[in-house]
Amino acid sequence: MSDEMRLRLAGYRLTTTEILYYLPDHPGLLQSFVWQGLDRAPEYPALRRFLAFWEREIEARLHSVKVATSEALAPPRFVAARGLFELH
């Protein structure tokens, strides 16, 4: 059994986080960073460690953090496309 499957069976979920931040040289410019990994909801220990690292080591001021998680274990979803679109 893979390490990822062991983590998923232990309750870890795929977690995607969008972090909005300001750099000191451009305080009027809001920038975005996406972090993704396996983490345990609702405590999110890996995300909390990453955010602590961010505040300690990176000179960017956090604006907001949005978190989305998937289900712990779910069957794969398949959706058939009903059309084909081409862009020139």
Image (tube, helix red, strand yellow):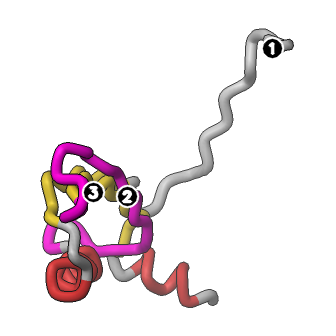
For residue 78, side relative to residue 70 (left or right): right
**The image quarter in which residue 33 lies:** bottom left
Looking at the picture, does residue 73 appear above or below residue 64? Answer: below
**The image quarter in which residue 22 lies:** bottom left
Which numbered disc, 2 or 1, marks the residue that appears first in the sequence? 2
Residue drawn 79% across the image and 11% down it: 85
Q: Quadrant of the N terminus?
A: bottom right
Q: Which residues are magenta?
A: 23-43
Measured as percent of width and height from the top left, residue 78 is found at 67, 36
Looking at the picture, does residue 38 appear above or below residue 69? Answer: below
Element type at marker 2?
strand
- 84, 72: nearer the viewer: 84
Q: Callout 1: few (<14), some (14-19), or many (20+) C-alpha neighbours within 10 Å?
A: few
Measured as percent of width and height from the top left, residue 59 is found at 21, 76
Q: Callout 2: few (<14), some (14-19), or many (20+) C-alpha neighbours within 10 Å?
A: few
**Residue tagged 3:** 19
